[in-house]
């Protein structure tokens, strides 16, 4: 039930830790070095649900009029490094297609003297999804795959439980996060080797979808693992071999790889740092953990320059990697995120408006590392910023946008709504969590305050009551159940399905559908 749901941040108790939905068993991985004696739980965050871009970040040029652009960019990065506790970082900035900034900051490992430089490699988390989308689109270019192919045409052993079958999921659903596959891996550390994706896909028979495929966007790492398997099957090579030769090498990305041993052999890599609530920091070597089934969703290593060149290649039409039409399709708005106006997802890429600019981006987090890649096609502008702590330097990226492009600085739109309209959200919802467990919860409005009431397995007579605080439009935050955990974000989505209007309540790790109330024979209103 919900109070023990596998949530987005670290669960200290038990044998599983979850961050961003990719869970790893509590083991001491080979190559791991840590600064305290508590048991180490390795976990990966392959991309939390995105938030609309803030409009106030680290100090930009407008706050430092006497500073050069170079100095202002440095201040953007250094300020954000302090804010998130990153010992080291690297940033590359391109404008009008030319590199205008490229340098490292700080240290490869906290407490050690070796400095980050422009070639230093970091894990990049969910930024990897762009490479998986490109690997699939290469098969589209070759005429082998159609985006509307059922996934089972390529992965016939893929099956599901529940009312929505595997046959309903298409390749497009995978690349747009509309498959409704729950964001959970039962055993991400295994299987291993070139058969990993095949063995994993064959094990999904007990998985239940959150909703009918195609109903709405909801972040799913396993969806991209399946997409990687489609690329592997169509391309005739194991996923790592396929991306190494046909994506990374074709794009001239010499520092990008999935192989931690290659990274270590290069001698120029960062160590990952994860701060825990008790003030300790766990330090991860590049080979501290691997998840072959997680590769297509977020396991690559790269450096800031390689990522920047990737974005420039997409803007310029696909280079030797993709056709112009496929590069454009990846960056084209495919599905609405149901967050704020003009926030969309393409094929492995977010598309949004920021201060009047048309932005493309994808960030990524894993335990120990964070990456953020952002570009503005109209300006042939790219920001690539990597750090060696769990949280990405997102604020630095948008600060650099402000410094270099000086976009519209007028007041942001007001995305609050009248609490009297929140009555539309109220009712009873049946939820499915990321492991397929089903539970019921209620949403009620008391005056101008919205509440969610969840069952309490420890005491059924005393349900858990949480206030929902509006973030923007139909999205609310809710205090987590474990002290020190970050808040949940919940989005109410009104969607017409199967001929009727239904209200959904979406979170990356659990999804609810409002239960139609019993129909009163005297009530002529159209039910949900």
Image (tube, rainbow, N blue to C red):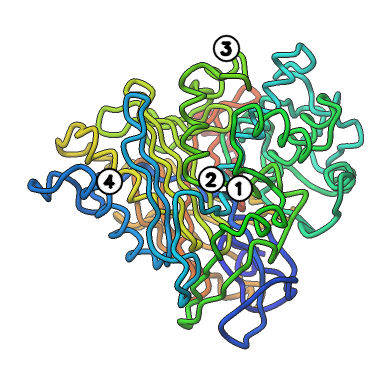
Q: Nearer the viewer, residue 322 or 169?
A: 322
Q: Secondary structure at mark 3?
A: helix
**Quarter of the rendering containing residue 286:** bottom right
Q: CA distance from mark 1 to mark 3?
A: 34 Å
Residue at 23% across, 32% down: 405
Image location (x, y in percent) of residue 391:
46, 59
Question: What is the distance, in whole Å, between disc 3 and disc 4 at their CAs?
Answer: 31 Å
Query: Reading the chain from its start, which is encountered first: label 2 or label 3?
Result: 3
Residue at point 16%, 44% (across, down): 68
The residue under label 4 is 399
The residue where tag 2 is placed is 505
Question: Is residue 465 among the parts visible in the rendering?
Answer: no
Where's the C terminus, which quadrant?
top right
Circles 2 and 1: CB distance less than 8 Å?
A: yes
Q: Is residue 275 above or below residue 155?
A: below
Image depth: mark 2 or mark 4 in front: 4
Residue 42, image x, y percentages:
66, 68
What's the CA distance linking mark 2 and mark 4?
A: 33 Å
Say what secondary structure mark 2 lies in. Answer: strand
List x then y, in percent, for residue 83.
33, 64
Of label 2 and label 1, which has the lower sequence position?
A: 2
- Label 3 neighbour load within 10 Å: few <14, some 14-19, many 20+: few
Q: Given this view, does label 1 or label 4 mark the residue nearer the observer? A: 4
First in residue order: circle 3 vs circle 4: 3
Whole-angstrom CA distance, mark 1 to mark 4, is: 34 Å
The residue where tag 3 is placed is 325
Q: Which mark is residue 511?
A: 1
* Above-or-below relation of 479 to 379: below
| Residue at screen point 62% across, 19% down | 320
Q: Single out the residue that lies furthest toward the left.
A: 66
Q: Secondary structure at mark 1?
A: strand
Give the number of the mark in front: 1 or 3.
Answer: 3
């Amino acid at each position: 039930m919900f109070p023990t749901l596998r949530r987005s941040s670290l669960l200290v108790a038990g044998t599983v830790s979850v961050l961003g939905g990719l869970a790893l068993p509590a083991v001491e991985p080979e190559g791991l070095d840590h600064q305290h004696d508590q048991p180490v739980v390795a976990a990966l965050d392959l991309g939390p649900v995105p938030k609309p871009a803030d409009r106030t970040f680290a100090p930009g040029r407008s706050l430092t009029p006497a500073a050069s652009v170079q100095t202002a960019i440095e201040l953007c990065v250094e300020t954000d490094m302090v804010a998130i506790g990153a010992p080291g970082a690297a940033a590359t900035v391109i404008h009008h297609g030319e590199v205008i900034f490229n340098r490292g900051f700080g240290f490869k490992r906290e407490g050690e003297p070796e400095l980050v430089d422009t070639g230093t490699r970091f894990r990049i988390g969910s930024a990897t999804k762009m490479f998986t989308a490109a690997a699939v689109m290469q098969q589209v270019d070759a005429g082998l795959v159609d985006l509307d192919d059922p996934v089972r045409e390529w992965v016939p052993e893929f099956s599901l439980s529940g009312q929505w079958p595997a046959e309903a999921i298409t390749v497009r659903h995978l690349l747009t996060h509309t498959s409704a596959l729950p964001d959970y891996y039962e055993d991400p550390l295994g299987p291993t080797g070139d058969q990993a994706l095949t063995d994993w896909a064959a094990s999904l028979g007990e998985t239940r979808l959150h909703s009918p495929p195609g109903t709405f966007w909801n972040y799913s790492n396993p969806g991209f693992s399946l997409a990687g398997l489609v690329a592997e099957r169509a391309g005739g090579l194991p996923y790592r071999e396929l991306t190494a030769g046909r994506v990374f090498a074709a794009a001239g990305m010499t520092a990008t790889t999935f192989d931690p041993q290659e990274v270590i052999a290069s001698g120029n890599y960062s160590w990952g740092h994860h701060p825990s609530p008790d003030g300790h920091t766990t330090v991860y070597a590049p080979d501290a953990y691997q998840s072959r089934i997680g590769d297509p969703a977020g396991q690559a290593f790269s450096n800031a320059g390689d990522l920047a060149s990737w974005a420039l290649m997409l803007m310029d039409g696909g280079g030797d990697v993709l056709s112009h039409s496929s590069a454009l399709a990846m960056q084209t708005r495919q599905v609405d995120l149901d967050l704020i106006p003009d926030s969309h997802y393409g094929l492995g890429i977010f598309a949004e408006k920021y201060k009047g600019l048309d932005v493309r981006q994808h960030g990524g987090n894993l335990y120990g590392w964070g990456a953020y890649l952002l570009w503005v096609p109209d300006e042939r502008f790219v920001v690539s910023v990597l750090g060696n702590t769990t949280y990405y330097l997102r604020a630095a990226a948008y600060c650099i946008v402000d410094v270099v492009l000086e976009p519209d600085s007028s007041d942001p739109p007001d995305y609050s709504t009248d609490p009297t309209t929140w009555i539309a959200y109220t009712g009873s919802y049946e939820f499915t969590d990321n492991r397929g467990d089903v539970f019921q919860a209620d949403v009620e409005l008391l005056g101008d305050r919205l509440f969610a009431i969840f069952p309490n397995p420890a005491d059924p007579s005393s349900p858990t009551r949480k206030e929902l605080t509006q973030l923007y439009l139909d999205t609310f935050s809710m205090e987590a159940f474990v002290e020190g955990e970050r808040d949940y974000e919940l989005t109410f989505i009104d969607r017409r399905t199967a001929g009727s209007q239904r209200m959904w309540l979406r979170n990356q790790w659990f999804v609810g559908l409002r239960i139609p109330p019993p129909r009163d024979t005297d009530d002529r209103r159209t039910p949900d």
